[in-house]
Image: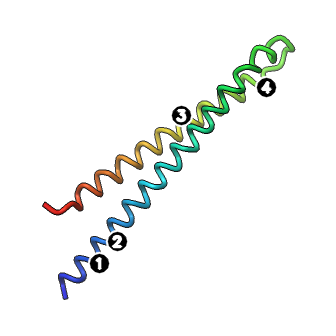
Amino acid sequence: MGELLDQDRRILEETDALELQSHGEVAITVAKALLGMDLILVCFVAVGFRTGSLLFLWWVVAEGLLGVILMGIGANRKSKAQKALSALEPE
């Protein structure tokens, strides 16, 4: 009976780790999309400077910062998930 409970606990821990890994991958994908959009918006920063507007500059800075933060969060989650999954590996 104790072996069954241990197996159920192991399955739950593995499921949690896989879910954490999936969330990390989603955060990295969203971050890449934001940074990709930033590359497009960078073209408009010079136009904004010429017209006296700083909208595109602040937009690019904010979106780039958000992308970098999400990239870090996603990498951290994936790292934690990998550690949890490797700890569950049978020896």
Query: Residue at 76% across / 25% down in the picture?
Result: 56
Q: Is residue 21 above or below residue 5?
A: above
Residue highlighted by disc 3: 68
Residue highlighted by disc 1: 8
Disc 3 crowd, CA 10 A, few/some/many (<14, 14-19, 20+): some
The residue under label 4 is which amino acid type?
Leu
Horizontal placement of 14 versus 68: left or right? left
Q: Is residue 32 above or below residue 85?
A: above
Q: Nearer the viewer, residue 51 or 28?
A: 28
Query: Residue at 54% across / 44% down in the picture?
Result: 29
Query: Residue at 87% across / 14% down in the picture?
Result: 51
Looking at the figure, which quarter contains the C terminus? bottom left
Quadrant of residue 85 within the rendered picture: bottom left
Q: How far apart are the two marked residues, 1 and 2, measured between alpha carbons?
A: 6 Å
**Label 2 vs 3, first from the N-terminus:** 2
The residue under label 1 is which amino acid type?
Asp
The residue under label 2 is which amino acid type?
Leu
**Label 3 vs 4, first from the N-terminus:** 4
| Mark in the foreground, 1 or 4 | 1
Q: Nearer the viewer, residue 42 or 72?
A: 42
Residue highlighted by disc 2: 12
Q: Is residue 15 above or below residue 64?
A: below
Q: How far apart are the two marked residues, 2 and 3, measured between alpha carbons?
A: 31 Å
Q: Confirm or deny contact between disc 2 and disc 4 (CB under 8 A).
A: no
Which structural element holds mark 4? helix
Q: Confirm or deny contact between disc 1 and disc 2 (CB under 8 A).
A: yes
Quadrant of residue 6 within the rendered picture: bottom left
